Image (cartoon, grey):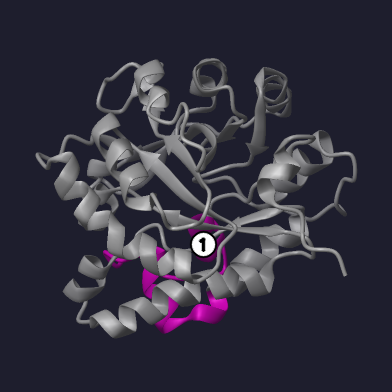
Amino acid sequence: MSAPESLAAALAGRVVILDGGLSNQLEAQGCDLSDSLWSARLLADAPGQIEAAHAAYARAGAQVLITSSYQATYEGFARAGIGRERAAELLTLSVALARRASSPGGWVAASAGPYGAMLADGSEYRGRYGLSVRELERFHRPRLETLAAAGPDVLALETVPDIDEAEALLRAASGLGVPVWLSYTVAGGRTRAGQPLDEGFALAAGNDQVLATGVNCCAPGDVPEAVATAVAVTGRPAVAYPNSGEDWDATARSWHGSASHPLTAARAWRAAGARLIGGCCRVGPAEINRLAAALTTQPPPEVSP
């Protein structure tokens, strides 16, 4: 039997479809995500719900499933009374659940969200926590070590709000033996902290561990410029998985506005060099199904909303 194709090799020749928002699918399944651990709490309380959510995206045509570890950190688990050994088991479980749900030949991306996700106060959309690069690296390294040891195909360094944290994450992932993608959350063509995107992507230029750079958890309209910049600066494929187009109010903890995740825009992202394409918050299996049908040569079966 031949070895599974690596994700890096797949990106050289085609678009690979990511999943959508894990939290909105869990909520659609009736899960309560009001806890500060968000979806990570279900790793301890209802892992079957997480696997079911992953499976919904796999059936829809997602070829990469992103784990439920975005908000899973040793510090966050400790605040919830979960000890370090059990926290390590839960981080490892996040990869196993995605692997079990993935389609044959599919890939698993272990999510590593920013420091602000652990704070659970919306600061991942601002960055600038008052911590040094070295302090942020010390925060991220233990979790990345545990996730890498669980055997994902790639580490998703995602929803990164500023350049300092991107540098810290890349340092923390160095030497772990797993490729990474680096994905900023942006607004108006700049990082959430207001820095130029070309400077942000330049951190990954020349880093052989990085297989793609791009954006996620942003408005669809912010994607084209970011994809073009990522490809121009790094010479690598881009990753693009924006939100539905609605806006998150961190104070009210609710979404406002109208959804707009158009297929025509996704085709333009592909033309600009995006090779990992999917959705983030409020993008569900039905939208991923339509993306897969439009952007791949072997579309999946149609799924109901």
Residue 226 drawn above or below residue 134: above
Residue 33 within the magenta-colored segment of the rendering: yes
Q: What residue is shown at x 49% (from left), y 57% (from top)?
A: 177
Looking at numbered disc 1 in the image, what kind of residue is underneath it? Answer: Thr
> In the current view of this chain or complex, which residue is farthest to the left?
130
Name the residue nearer the viewer: 153 or 3: 3
Q: Give the dominant element type of the magenta stretch: helix, strand or loop.
A: helix
On the image, the x and y values in percent for residue 150 come to 50, 71
* Residue 35 position within the rendered picture, expressed as x and y whole percent measured from the top left: 29, 67
Percent position of residue 6, x then y: 70, 52
Task: Please provide the residue range marked out in magenta.
Answer: 22-49
In the displayed structure image, the side of residue 52 where residue 145 appears, left or right: left
- In this rendering, is residue 278 above or below 145? above
Residue 129 against residue 191 in the figure, above or below: below
Q: Residue at x 55, y 15 (%)?
A: 232
Tell whether 87 sits left or right of 96. Answer: left
Answer whether residue 285 is visible to the viewer in this image: yes
Which of the image's four quarters has the N terminus?
bottom right
Answer few, some or many: residues within 10 Å of disc 1's Cα (few below 14, many 20 plus, some between 14 and 19).
many
Q: Residue at x 69, y 19 (%)?
A: 268
Within the magenta stretch, is there residue 289? Answer: no
Q: What residue is pinned by disc 1? A: 67
SS type, badge 1: loop
The reply to whether residue 188 is visible in this rendering is no
Left or right position of 294 against 243: right
Q: Is residue 192 left or right of residue 189?
A: left
**Residue 236 x, y percent position in the rendering:** 59, 28
